[in-house]
Image (cartoon, grey):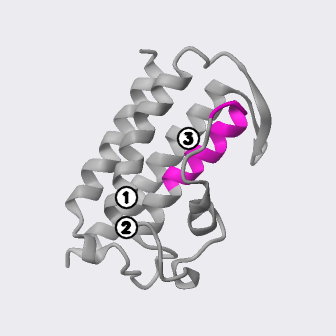
């Protein structure tokens, strides 16, 4: 497995380890100064990977596309309907997504992106660039979630 894919799996494993340490009754607590919750960050990581990697390869089939209305940029837990994915559903989706991404993209990293995304002046022109972004993005939200967990454990 290429180094990038190993790094992605490392990041995903780290996310799942942290999420499993946070009591599910704390997943919806939004401390002062935090724009979102553990549940939102976990779902956001999942949905962002699905969206960006579908743009990287239009044949990559997104799972749980209805979740985008809950977890993509600009969404807020305070505006959610009553029925949202449970922590267990989100953790399972993240776990399954890891293997789907590895299986689907491992031999496609050099391919040109179906849709080139501009991320603050960085054009994601290849599948590899999109995977790099998705991996970096997950690390950022792992940090946010870790900060939340420290406050929630007080």
Q: Residue at x 48, y 52 (%)?
A: 140
Q: Earlier in the sequence, mark 2 or mark 3?
A: 2
Crowdedness near tag 2: few (<14), some (14–19) or many (≥20) residues, C-alpha within 10 Å = few
Give the percent coordinates (x, y) of residue 150: 26, 69
- Tell me which corner region of the image, top left, top right, bottom left or bottom right, holds residue 97: top left
The CA distance from mark 1 to mark 3 is 20 Å
Query: Which residue appears at 63% of the width and 37% of the height?
Result: 53
Q: Are marks 1 and 3 in contact (CB under 8 Å)?
A: no
- Magenta span: predominant SS is helix
Q: Is 47 one of the magenta-colored residues?
A: yes
Quick one: label 3, few (<14), some, or many (20+) residues within 10 Å?
many
Q: Which residue is mark 2?
A: 86
Q: Is 19 in front, or is 50?
A: 50
Mark 1 or 3: the one toward you: 1
Looking at the figure, which quarter contains the N terminus? top left
Give the residue drawn at x 35%, y 34%: 10
Q: Are marks 1 and 2 in contact (CB under 8 Å)?
A: yes
Q: Which residue is mark 3?
A: 134
Q: Which mark is residue 89?
A: 1
User: Which quarter of the picture shows residue 25?
Assistant: bottom left
Segment colored magenta: 45-60
């Amino acid at each position: 497995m290429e180094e990038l894919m190993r790094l992605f799996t490392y990041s995903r494993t780290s996310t799942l380890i942290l999420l499993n340490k946070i009591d599910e009754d704390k997943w919806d607590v939004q401390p002062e100064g935090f724009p979102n919750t553990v549940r939102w960050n976990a779902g956001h990581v999942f949905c962002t990977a699905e969206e960006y990697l579908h743009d990287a390869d239009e044949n990559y089939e997104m799972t749980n596309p209805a979740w985008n209305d809950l977890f993509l940029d600009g969404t807020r837990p305070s505006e959610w309907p009553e029925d949202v994915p449970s922590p267990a559903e989100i953790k399972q989706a993240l776990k399954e997504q890891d293997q789907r991404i590895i299986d689907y993209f491992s031999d496609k990293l050099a391919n040109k992106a179906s849709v080139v995304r501009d991320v603050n002046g960085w054009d994601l022109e290849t599948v590899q660039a999109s995977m790099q972004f998705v991996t970096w993005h997950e690390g950022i939200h792992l940090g946010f979630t870790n900060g939340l967990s420290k406050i929630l454990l007080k």
